[in-house]
């Protein structure tokens, strides 16, 4: 189950949750609340098992043609689908009963997470097979995770600018991850944002979205936004010069290290700014 849950990517869900918690908390003592720890555990493993388990079941026909699934991730055979479905339910459902149901912001955010994360891969919507909508659904569950953390600790109002910045960054992240799969997705007849826009078009879109995210978040984290904006700009420009898919895939395998590092820098920038630690 660890390989199915993409343990390399666990921080991708935990990070937005942490951002939401720190942005919504009125004081550092709120972070000691048991519910924060409980749902940190949820977004660390069960949420990822939900996302990628469903993905692996509905993506089998494409995945069996994709070298990345065999060499870098995990290929889930049809004979394993029933047991995987049961394990997903056993790990996810208990946490849903722990949501404070009178906290409507948290409740609706969790429902949004389950919707976007599930129907990204699952029928009848299967958003990942609808160009552009695929990236929006993928980004949607990350943004919903951040919103859940924000409302869980009592955050009020709607943090419009940070959520739009997160949406831009998440769409870029998803679109970039689809670029190494262009050949296998095209062979399987799967239309994605990357197969539709092509390698160059997708990478230019990613570049614009990363820059937009940095601009939007600047008023919250200052120079950190500029530095990270430059880092991702360089990465996108470097990707544009790469000709071989296998070389681009190799660069992509570094993103599970690059993204958490960037996330941690933003996390501490928010922490210091939000609670005037420095």
Image (tube, helix red, strand yellow):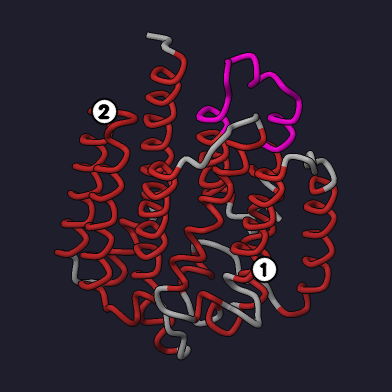
Q: Quadrant of residue 200?
A: bottom left
N-term-proximal mark, 2 vs 1 = 1
Residue 203 vertical placement versus 191 (above, below): above
Residue 60 vertical placement versus 28 (above, below): below
**Main secondary structure along the magenta-highlighted residues:** helix
Q: Position of residue 36 (x, y in %)?
A: 69, 30
Q: What residue did someone put label 1 on? A: 54
Q: Is 207 or 166 nearer to us in this picture?
A: 166
Q: Quadrant of residue 4?
A: bottom right
Residue 161 in the figure: left or right of residue 223: right
Residue occupying image coordinates x 72% and y 22%:
33
Query: What stretch of residues is rendered in magenta?
Result: 21-40
Q: Is 30 or 171 nearer to us in this picture?
A: 30
Q: Quadrant of the N terminus?
A: bottom right
Residue 129 in the figure: left or right of residue 89: left
Q: What residue did someone put label 2 on? A: 222
Q: Is 133 or 187 nearer to us in this picture?
A: 133
Q: Position of residue 39 (x, y in %)?
A: 70, 38
Residue occupying image coordinates x 76% and y 73%:
81
Q: Position of residue 72 (x, y in %)?
A: 49, 61
Label 2 secondary element: loop
Q: Quadrant of the C terminus?
A: top left
Residue occupying image coordinates x 70% and y 43%:
42
Residue 54 in the figure: left or right of residue 205: right
Label 1 secondary element: helix
């Amino acid at each position: 189950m660890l390989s199915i849950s993409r343990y390399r990517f666990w921080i991708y869900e935990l990070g937005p949750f942490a951002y939401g918690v720190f942005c919504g908390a009125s004081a550092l003592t709120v972070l000691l609340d048991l519910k924060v720890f409980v749902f940190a555990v949820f977004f660390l493993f069960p949420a990822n098992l939900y996302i990628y388990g469903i993905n692996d079941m509905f993506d089998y026909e494409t995945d069996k043609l994709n070298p990345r699934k065999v060499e870098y991730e995990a290929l889930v055979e049809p004979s394993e689908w029933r047991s995987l479905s049961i394990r997903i339910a056993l790990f996810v459902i208990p946490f849903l009963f722990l949501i404070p149901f009178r906290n409507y912001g948290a409740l609706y955010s969790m429902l949004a997470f389950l919707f976007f994360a599930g129907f990204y891969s699952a029928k009848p919507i299967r958003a990942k097979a609808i160009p552009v909508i695929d990236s929006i659904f993928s980004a949607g569950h990350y943004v919903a995770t951040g919103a859940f953390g924000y409302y869980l600790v009592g955050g009020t109002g709607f943090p419009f600018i940070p959520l739009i910045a997160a949406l831009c960054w998440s769409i870029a992240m998803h679109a970039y991850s689809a670029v190494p799969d262009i050949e296998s997705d095209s062979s399987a007849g799967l239309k994605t944002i990357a197969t539709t826009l092509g390698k160059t078009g997708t990478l230019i879109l990613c570049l614009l979205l990363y820059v937009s995210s940095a601009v939007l978040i600047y008023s919250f984290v200052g120079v950190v936004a500029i530095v990270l904006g430059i880092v991702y700009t360089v990465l996108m420009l470097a990707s544009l010069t790469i000709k071989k898919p296998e070389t681009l895939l190799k660069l992509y395998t570094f993103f599970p290290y690059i993204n958490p590092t960037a996330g941690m820098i933003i996390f501490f920038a928010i922490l210091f700014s939000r609670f005037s630690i420095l």
